[in-house]
Image (cartoon, grey):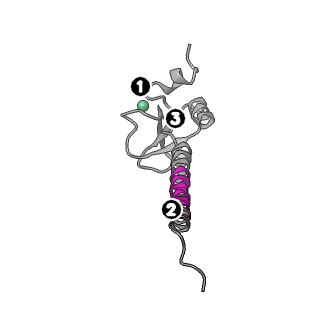
Amino acid sequence: MSDPPSRLELLHFARRVVVQQAMASLAQLDGWIADEERREAERRRGEEARPSRPEWLIERGLNRDNVVAVHQGDCWDAGKRHVTVTRAQAVEALRQQVPACTQCRPDTALGLLE
Ligand SMILES: [Zn+2]
């Protein structure tokens, strides 16, 4: 039979337990921090990936083939039937004599007028 642990041995044992618990808590906390940092990074990436507002719109008439006007992307007068187009497509449409909207003047914005 060994002697019962001394008070000093018990204190050392208690110290080891406290250190282990603290290390476990620290690891858990670090895990939460890492998770949160990952979520934050994903949220930022999501915002960057979100499409910005369209720059150019082509408004169509009731007939699918009928093109009514070219607009800037934020034009309030673009109507309900419009498609988003690239800058090159907007320029091409204006060259094809598609009227430029008189409200937002995409021809001026595209630098096609003096
Ligand atoms: Zn317009």
Give x and y (percent) for residue 106.
50, 27
- The residue indicated by pointer 1 is 102
Secondary structure type for disc 1: loop
Q: Residue at x 54, y 50 (%)?
A: 37
Q: Residues within 10 Å of mark 3 (few under 14, many from 20)?
A: some
Q: Is residue 59 above or below residue 24?
A: above
- Disc number placed over residue 18 in the picture, else none: 2
Secondary structure type for disc 2: helix
Magenta: predominant secondary structure element?
A: helix
The image quarter in which residue 96 lies: top right
- Disc number placed over residue 55 in the picture, else none: 3
Part of the protein shown in magenta: 18-38
Q: Quadrant of the N terminus?
A: bottom right
Q: CA distance from mark 2 to mark 1?
A: 75 Å
Q: Residue at x 48, y 28 (%)?
A: 100
Q: Where in the image, quadrant-wise, is ligand 1 located?
A: top left
